[in-house]
Amino acid sequence: MAMRQTPLTCSGHTRPVVDLAFSGITPYGYFLISACKDGKPMLRQGDTGDWIGTFLGHKGAVWGATLNTDATKAATAAADFTAKVWDAVSGDEVLSLAHKHIVKSVNFTQDSSCLLTGGNDKLLRIYDLSNPETALQEITGHGAAIKKALWCNNDKQILSAAEDKTIRLWDRNSMEEVKTLTFDTTVSSMEYVAEGEILVITYGKTIAFYNALSLELIKTVEAPAPINSASLHPEKDFFVAGGEDFKLYKFDYSTTEELESYKGHFGPVHCVRFSPDGELYASGSEDGTLRLWQTAVGKTYGLWKCVLPEDLGTENSEQLYSSTPEIKA
């Protein structure tokens, strides 16, 4: 008897959820931040989806959000031409970094000392957060708006994806372009997996895996529908993807076989990410919700409680664990 996937639904946003990110594992668990067009990024407990707080201060849609490894700092990228840095414990705004156009992407270095931003002005910016006004570095080269910019290779290099249908690898010290990948269509998402130096890219219906250092192709997988985001499991066992058909797809990474697909959202899926322990993945959608999905369905974890069939008292019950079909977090 197959177990039924029961996602946790995280409500609170009033517009589409366009980006999400997990922290690393801290002594207090791990955390999840979501970016939304309502301009109010939210912080949640990662394993349960419980709301912790909302970062208030942006005057436009928030397109990107991230947490540093220990979840003490948050950063957001917005349509009000700013990137903001926040104290993720108190919720206070620490810095507001003015840009010349909409900001789409924010990413901390591993030590949280620098912030990388990218957006519609086609520039990559590196801010030294201890001296943000005077120590700004800018990298030019993209011919259109930057959608995502990420540190890689122990923060010695930068990966950027833009509307010019390219992904570019940059050297941080020289600020020179190292290599460029060109695609037939705009790249919809990019995830960097430090363990193994893997780059996960989506464009059209394709999910592609590259070596992040050489930008050599490892493998590609075609999905049944246009994909907006994909994420690789920390152990490299699985990857998940979501897109325009409202579904979440789970694939075996080694064989690329489609294992499962789930429909829970009521609009296109814009972003999907595995938790740092790999026990769940989160999705954000046009429908304004985040949903948390179990990697191993039926396992006792977070708010999911496994109930063995003999404990249910009925042989033919389909409900194999004691969560209701729609759990609101």
Image: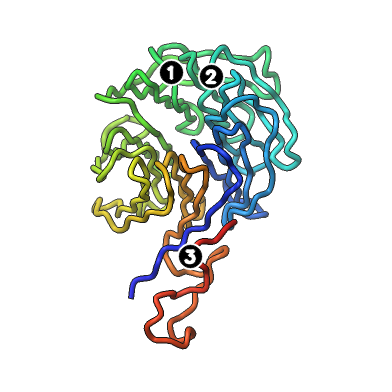
SS state under label 3: loop
Which callout, 3 or 1, points to the residue nearer the camera?
Answer: 3
Q: Quadrant of residue 328?
A: bottom right
| Residue 112 picture location, percent across and down | 63, 33
248 over 5 or under it: above or below: above
Q: Quadrant of residue 50?
A: bottom right
Residue located 46% across and 42% down the image = 285
Q: Which residue is mark 1?
A: 145
Using the image, tell me which numbered label, if any, was put on residue 325: 3
Specify whether 92 is left or right of 177: right
The residue that appears at 38% across and 70% down in the rendered structure is 3
* Res 174 seen here: no
Query: Residue at label 2?
Result: 102
Residue sitting at x 39%, y 47%: 232
Q: Residues within 10 Å of mark 3 (few under 14, many from 20)?
A: few
The CA span between labels 3 and 1 is 41 Å
Of tags 3 and 2, which is closer to the observer? 3
- The three-letter code of the residue at mark 2 reads Ile
Q: Tag 2's secondary structure?
A: loop
Q: Are marks 2 and 1 in contact (CB under 8 Å)?
A: yes
Amino acid type, mark 3: Pro
Position above or below: 187 against 254? above
The residue sitting at 48% across, 17% down in the picture is: 120
Classify residue 221 as left or right of residue 271.
left
Image coords of residue 230 (percent x, y)? 38, 42
Q: Quadrant of the C terminus?
A: bottom right
Residue type, label 1 = Ala
